[in-house]
Structures are given as structure tokens and as C-alpha cells.
Amino acid sequence: MRQRLGARIIDGFALFAILIVAVLPFVDLRSVEAGETPEFATGDQLAIQAIAMVLWALYTIPSVTRWGQTMGRFLVGIRVARIDDGGSPDLGQAAIRFLLPNTLALVPAVGPVLFFAVLIRAAFNPERRGWHDLAAGTVVLRQR
């Protein structure tokens, strides 16, 4: 579980820099220059969440499909594999793995709890498979 968390943190830092650039059009830079905290309208907050989700998906799904791992997973020595033959997940499997926890995270008020519930199952399962792994037919394997 520590490796999965470490990989997620590494990937998060990598994408955070890209997200900052993508979000700049929504920031009133005059308020920042004046030392104020910028405020976003509700529509802007939704747009920022959508941009973040799309960027995360564009980073994760192709990487998992091609190599079975993202940069973070590579650095901590784990990869995602098909449960049936150990190969890299296909596009559908990678998309299911990504979409199940991340779309649940968007549910108002309870999203973070649902997100966590999908992932934490891996800590209590002998095969270390979360609900997203079960739905996609995947497993996370150590490489080293």
C-alpha cells in the first residue's frame, strides 16, 4: 500500500505543475498581485475540476495501457497488470481503473469517502486488489 500511495504522490506532483498552467486563465492575477487570495466563481471551480480530471486521465490511462505504469509507479517499482495473463491492461481496463474511483470522488459531500473506499479495499484483500482492480480485471505487481 505504501508503494501505491508513494506512486500517487509522485504522479500528483508531476501533474500539479501542468495543472497550474492550465488553471491560470481562471485566476484574476490582479488580485494575486495585490496580495489577495483569488476567488473563483462556482463555474470556474467546476471547470478547474474538469481540467484536472481530464489531465489526470490523459496522463494515467495511456501510460497504464502502454507500459502498465505511470512515472510514479515506475519510480516505486510497481506496475498494473491484467489478472489473466500479467500483460499491460488494455484501454478499457485502464479506463475502468481510472474512472471508477475518480468519478466517485466527484459526488458532492461524499465523494472523497467513496474514492477512499474504492482504493482502501486493497489493504484488506489478500491479493491487494481494490474495487477498481476487481472491476477492471487488473492487479498491481511489484517489479523489484
Image (spheres, helix red, strand yellow):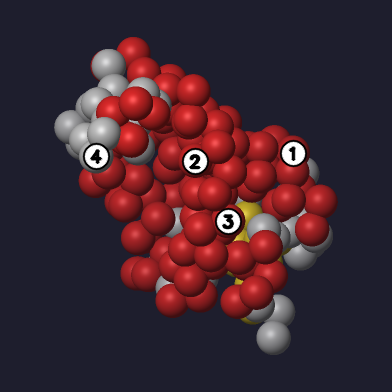
What residue would you read off at disc 2? 20
Q: Are marks 4 and 1 in contact (CB under 8 Å)?
A: no
**x and y, in percent, of residue 100 in the image:** 47, 38
Q: CA distance from mark 1 to mark 2?
A: 27 Å
Q: CA distance from mark 3 to mark 4?
A: 27 Å
Query: What is the CA distance from the residue labelled 3 to the residue labelled 1?
Result: 22 Å
**Viewer-side label of 1, 2:** 2
Mark 4 residue type: Gly
Q: Residues within 10 Å of mark 3 (few under 14, many from 20)?
A: some
Residue highlighted by disc 4: 35
The residue under label 1 is 91
Residue nearest the viewer, comparing 136 with 36: 36
Disc on res. 14? 3
With 41 as the anchor, is 126 left or right in this view? Answer: right
Task: Identify the residue shown where x is 32% and y is 52%.
Answer: 116
In the image, which is nearer the foreground, mark 4 or mark 1?
A: 4
Amino acid type assigned to the residue bearing label 1 in the image: Leu
